[in-house]
Amino acid sequence: MLEQDKNPENLNQSEEPAKASENSNISDYVGGNLNNYYPHPAHTPTPYKRIDQDEIFEHITHRQSFTVVILCWIFGILFADLFLTAGFGLSIPILTALFYAIAFWYLTKKNIIISKQSLVLLIPIALLSLGYFIQDNETTYLINTLLLVCLIPLQLCHMSRTTSGRIFSLQSIYDTIISFVARPIIYLDVPFKAISTNIGKKEKGSKSTMIVLGLVISLPLAAIFISLFIKADEAFGFLANKVYENLNISFGKIYFDLIFGTGTAIFIAAWLITLRARKVPEKTIIKPCKGINEILTATVFIVIDLIFILFVIIQLGYLFAGMELPNGMSYADYARSGFFELCGVLCVSVIVIMICLIFVQKNDKQRLPGYISFLLTVFILCNYVIIASSAYRMITYISAYDLSEKRVMVTWLDAVFAICMIGAIIKIWRPKFNAFSFTALTVIIMSVALNTVNVKALIADYNVDKYLESRTTSSERKVDIEYLGNLGSSAVKATYRLYVNSDYEIKDRALNALKTQERLLSYKTWKNYSLPDIQASSLLKQIKLPDNNQNTDFSVSS
């Protein structure tokens, strides 16, 4: 057989049919005879599919997805009208309750058992949202907003069973970011598909749904036609303007609410639909990098600890042992010059502690080396002395310069740092301790507690009380009455008390502060009203504010 294959005649015989076939195909193609030409089949590319696309597209065929898009659109318009154009206040608890009514109705259709952890998390969410009505403090509003932006996605992620981690864990944070940010952005077209898929379906209740959809579509068209008719006919425009004045609405505001509300609705609807369709993801093992070298870490902490120990010795001498300050500086000025800088030291220290606990090399039992644990503990204990120094400085400072919002809030932040560092010390010596959950719970509890205190009223009462007490002594202290006026409605009661118990220049300035507070209150509507606004409005209605050129007294009517 091998010799036969090597025979040139046999080779020529075997090659001739192949050459003949090839020449035949070429001649057919060149000659234009395509009937005998059979090209290779073209490669058909596989269509690109997004993650969980089949499950999500299956859910948008349900009537509930169509309804939730309409409900989110209504919520988006109310969000723009109640919050963006009015501000913080009563609108926030109303919007939070409305949002959760929509979310609970839609996500419970997933036929899942809601976890107890997610239900417990509703308590701080409700209290924080209610804090916008109880409080009248912009800094508290900022803290509440940051927490709600974190807690609401986390709660919904656990309620819909779209995370496999504990409620306060890196796994839970990772799944929440995916569910709240990545997936809604990837599936922004889902609300439109939900509407187009369900329009025309002959299902029970479709007539009422079509009526609602018709009203939704007619609103922007009606606004456009009315605005054009106002320009086209003066009589129609006069009548329409009278109606708008009585209803206190404008076309610009309507257009803004519609545009912003639609954009908000698209994102929220995509978020809720993808939450309902998503299955419980596989647990992702999240590990930090290999770790920072322990020798490097120890060297850094030796230098830092020496600096901190030197600073602590000075603090113990000047603030707690009564040593004489340099250059004849008073203790009030000494406290004023360093309080906020020490708060900055605490912020940097917390970051350093977190980096060390997460990224420094550990042994097989996830424990830091003994000498690093000791150096880090010394560092934290030095920070406690700094916290004590900061608190002592603040007490001394307040006794001389009164309270302010910044001084109260920074003191509150120092207290949060002090409690969180207790968890850090426990974590150093007991690696199984969940320091992350401890820190999260501390921040939530301290923030809820902050909402129970009317900070502005506390400041006004303290400053006025200290001034009135100083009038019975030989040295009358100063009181910043203009600052009281800018505190707004929360300070009305204290400012009125200052007016009644003062005379001459202080009385006139207190009257101006009351008028400032009354003017600030007049700018508010029911949407951004708070409990202090209601109390101040009730008090001001009982008071007849005289003109500045009148020396008549006024009192609360019975």
Image (cartoon, grey):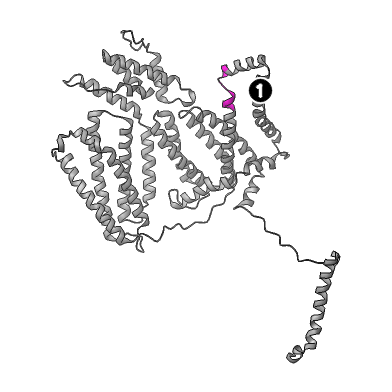
> Which image quadrant is residue 416 in?
top left
Q: Residue at x 68, y 19 (%)?
A: 232
Q: Is residue 198 above or below residue 19?
A: above
**Disc 1 crowd, CA 10 A, few/some/many (<14, 14-19, 20+):** some
**Number of numbered markers:** 1
Q: Is residue 261 above or below residue 513?
A: below
Asked if residue 493 is among those painted magenta in the image, a careful observer would answer no
* Residue 111 in sight from this viewpoint: no
Residue placed most toward the observer, 362 or 117: 362
Residue occupied by mark 1: 226
Q: Is residue 372 above or below residue 97?
A: below
Residue placed most toward the observer, 126 or 399: 399
Q: Amino acid at mark 1?
A: Ile
Q: Residue at x 46, y 42 (%)?
A: 150
> Which image quadrant is residue 364 in?
bottom left
The secondary structure type at the circle numbered 1 is helix
* Residue 497 in sight from this viewpoint: yes
What segment carries the magenta color? Answer: 245-254
Q: Position of residue 296 (x, y in %)?
A: 31, 60
Q: Position of residue 169 (x, y in %)?
A: 43, 51
User: Which quarter of the image is occupied by the C terminus?
Assistant: top left
User: Which quarter of the image is occupied by the N terminus?
Assistant: bottom right
Q: Position of residue 455 (x, y in %)?
A: 34, 30
Magenta: main secondary structure: helix
User: Taking 515 as reference, is 18 left or right?
Assistant: right
Q: Residue at x 81, y 84 (%)?
A: 13
